Amino acid sequence: MLRTFHSAPLLAFIVGILVGTPTISAAGSSPSCVHARAEARYLGFAYDHWVHIRNACEKPVACTVTTNVNPDPIDVDVPAAEARSVLTFRANTSSQFTYDLSCSFKE
């Protein structure tokens, strides 16, 4: 009896390990119209850690980003209906990181 081997699940598993799945931490608070996601970009030898912030609010927001890899706060202003990307760490050996995002409306 011949067995067929399906490579798609294995390939998805390997890509998941290589790319990683950065996650958001529960800490921090932001208006519900502010959305963020993490990305670990592979450079061939290490990963750049990015946090992408999208402001769907009608007002600009001031945000602070920290990560478990870089606890130094990074401040970023995001105008209404715009997005900003923040490089939080360059050339890290880990594809996994968590971030805290805290945003508030600008006065």
Image (cartoon, rainbow, N blue to C red):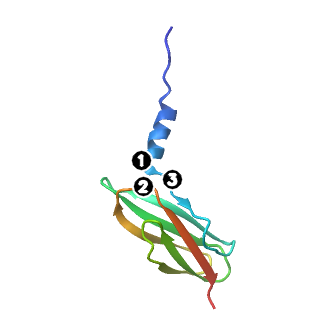
* Kind of residue indicated by mark 3: Thr
Q: Count of labels shown?
A: 3
Q: Disc 3 designates what residue?
A: 21
Disc 1: CA contacts within 10 A as few (<14), some (14-19) or many (>=20): some
31 w.r.t. 13: above or below: below
Give me the C-alpha separation between circle 1 and circle 2: 7 Å
Write down the quadrant of residue 43 in the picture: bottom left
Considering every residue shown, the one lying at the far left of the view is: 45
Residue 80 in the image, given as x and y percentages of width and height = 62, 80
Cβ atoms at labels 2 and 3 below 8 Å apart: no
Query: What secondary structure is marked by label 2?
Result: loop
The residue at the point 55 percent across, 70 percent down is: 100
Q: Secondary structure at mark 1?
A: helix
Q: CB under 8 Å between callouts 1 and 2? A: yes
Q: CA distance from mark 3 to mark 1?
A: 9 Å
Labelled disc at residue 95:
2
